[in-house]
Image: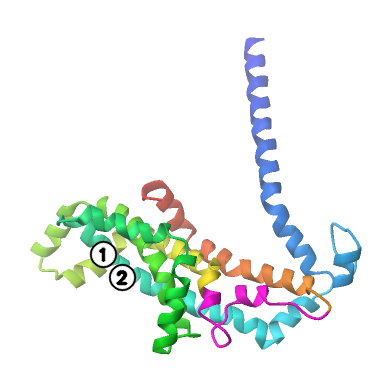
Amino acid sequence: MAAQSAARGTGLRLNGKAVVMTLYLVFLLLPIYWLLNMSLKTNSEILNVFSLWPRDLTFANYRTILTDPSWYMGYVNSLIYVVMNTVISLTVALPAAYAFSRYSFMGDKHLFFWLLTNRMAPPAVFALPFFQLYSSVGLFDTHIAVALAHCLFNVPLAVWILEGFMRGVPKEIDETAYIDGYGFGRFFIRIFMPLIASGIGVAAFFCFMFSWVELLLSRTLTSVNAKPIAATMTRTVSASGLDWGVLAAAGVLTIVPGALVIYFVRNYIAKGFALGRV
């Protein structure tokens, strides 16, 4: 009887956990489903009828985005400056994180903390200085302007993440490589970087996602040629009001790049959360 009671109690606990997890997943996925549901409806159905699925299924909203340059160029512009920012941030952060993890120098902890304060500051603080600076040097409304502006926030984050991974690599590996005749560049690329591949993957993921979802700087520093999809979505108003179906379709397509990045670096992210400073 005692064994049966214990088994019954264990089963109830497992069932309770399953119910809680199911409710949590439903809570998380409901907004995404509703966005997808709206993207497959007409505006009249969205505004006049409440339904859990499209009654008059249409792909016209997606057709509008994929055929109208004012829409699909927003995705192209966003991808260009996000990829540029990720590459620049990692290129700068890797040697900086190595220096913080391997050497001690005067003010190193203060400098490290100062880097993190840039990540803590709101983008609105830097919007006006960046706007005036880039306007004066002719970089306004260019992809490199947004990519460099986002480096102010992503480089400190990447340094912080990578420094935690690099501290976990014994210094004896560096010394052994130098004894074997490796130069710093060859050692860093061929030996050290593979050892912290999970950290690089995690840093790249966060740099990509922060740059992809950031709106204030990307909207302030662009107007036409480099306008991102987030800015395009906030300016979509016609004489008849908002085009809800097109906006919902744009939202669905905006989720896709982030989901693809998560899929390709999922193993690195799992290792990073388990071993690194994340």
- Residue 243 in picture, x, y percent from top left: 78, 74
Mark 2 and mark 1 in contact (Cβ < 8 Å)? yes
Q: CA distance from mark 1 to mark 2?
A: 7 Å
Label 1 amino acid?
Ala
| Of 258 and 220, the residue lying toward us | 220
Which dot marks residue 164? Answer: none
**In the rendered view, does 218 fall on the left or right side of 148?**
right
Determine the secondary structure under disc 1. helix
Q: Position of residue 245 (x, y in %)?
A: 78, 71
Vertical relation: 2 (above or below) 222: above
Name the image quarter holding the N terminus.
top right
Residue under the point 68% across and 68% down: 251
Image x and y of residue 87, in percent: 39, 74
The part of the chain drawn in magenta is 218-239
| Left or right of residue 247, residue 270 in this image | left
Which residue lies at the image location 34% right of the left edge and 56% below the top edge?
A: 160
Mark 2, residue position: 92
Using the rendered image of the protein, determine whether residue 42 is visible from the camera's viewpoint: no
Disc 2 packing (10 Å; few <14; some 14–19; many ≥20): some
List x then y, in percent, for residue 168: 27, 50
Give the color scheme: rainbow, by chain, secondary structure or one colour. rainbow
Question: Residue 101's image quarter?
Answer: bottom left
Magenta includes 248? Answer: no
Residue at left offset 42%, top offset 65%? 204
Question: Is residue 164 among the parts visible in the rendering?
Answer: yes
| Residue that mark 1 sits on | 96
Amino acid type at image mark 2: Val
Residue that extends furthest to the left in the rendered view of this protein: 179
Q: In this orientation, which residue lies closer to the viewer: 69 or 263?
A: 69
Task: Judge from the rendering whether residue 203 lies leftward or rightward of residue 177; answer left or right.
Answer: right
Q: Nearer the viewer, residue 206 or 137?
A: 137
